[in-house]
Image (tube, grey):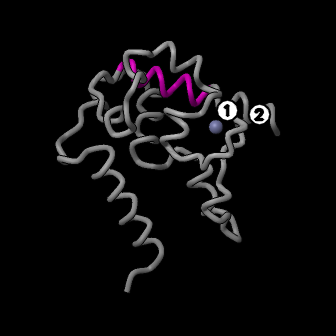
Amino acid sequence: MWCEKDLVAKIKLGYYKKVINPTLEDQNYLSILTSSKKKMNMAKIRMNSRELHSETGRWVVPKTPWMERICHICEDRNIVDENHFLLECPAYNDIRSQFHNLCYNIDLPSLLQCQNYSDLGKLLSKIFEHRNKISNQIK
Ligand SMILES: [Zn+2]
């Protein structure tokens, strides 16, 4: 019998295989990136533990229903998953425009499988920093 912890681990493994690393090949971003902050942000997004509301909503008691795990940063009222956070949320459009080579007309698996670890690390750092800044202003 599956316990919830096993199911969550299975869902996260499925996400990892589907979105991050379909061939389960070794990923060398940890040896390429020199900044520990970039490594941490990359690991967070790749391990589905990036503290987005889609994830944190299941940490509270009672759990926030999936459809109510919306983005509090923008007015779009979309569920704040990785796709919204990295590719859709208008609050980060200015940052994405600085990384046009990575972000233009791309889907989430392609972005996260990108081998340009340096730029991807910079993009993630800037988006996380901006989110934290906005979140602190909202509180
Ligand atoms: Zn948003």
Which residue is found at the position 39% from the left and 26% from the top?
Answer: 105
- Predominant secondary structure in magenta? helix
Tell me, for residue 23, which label it has, or none: none
Q: Which residue bears the numbered disc 1?
A: 132
Helix, strand or loop status at disc 1: helix
What segment is highlighted magenta in the picture? 118-129
The answer to whether mark 1 and mark 2 are in CB contact below 8 A is: yes
Q: Is residue 75 left or right of residue 84?
A: right
Q: Is residue 137 left or right of residue 84?
A: right
Place residue 61 in its image quadrant. bottom right
Q: Position of residue 121 (x, y in %)?
A: 42, 24
Q: Amino acid at mark 2?
A: Asn
Marks 1 and 2, Cα distance to the nearest angstrom? Answer: 6 Å
Q: Position of residue 104 (x, y in %)?
A: 41, 21
Asked if the magenta segment contains residue 122, the reply would be yes
Q: Position of residue 47 (x, y in %)?
A: 41, 48
- Depth check, front residue: 109 or 37: 109
**Is the residue marked by circle 2 packed among few (<14), some (14-19), or many (20+) residues within 10 Å?**
few
Q: How many marks?
A: 2
Q: Which residue bears the numbered disc 2?
A: 136
Q: Amino acid at mark 1?
A: Asn
Place residue 135 in its image quadrant. top right
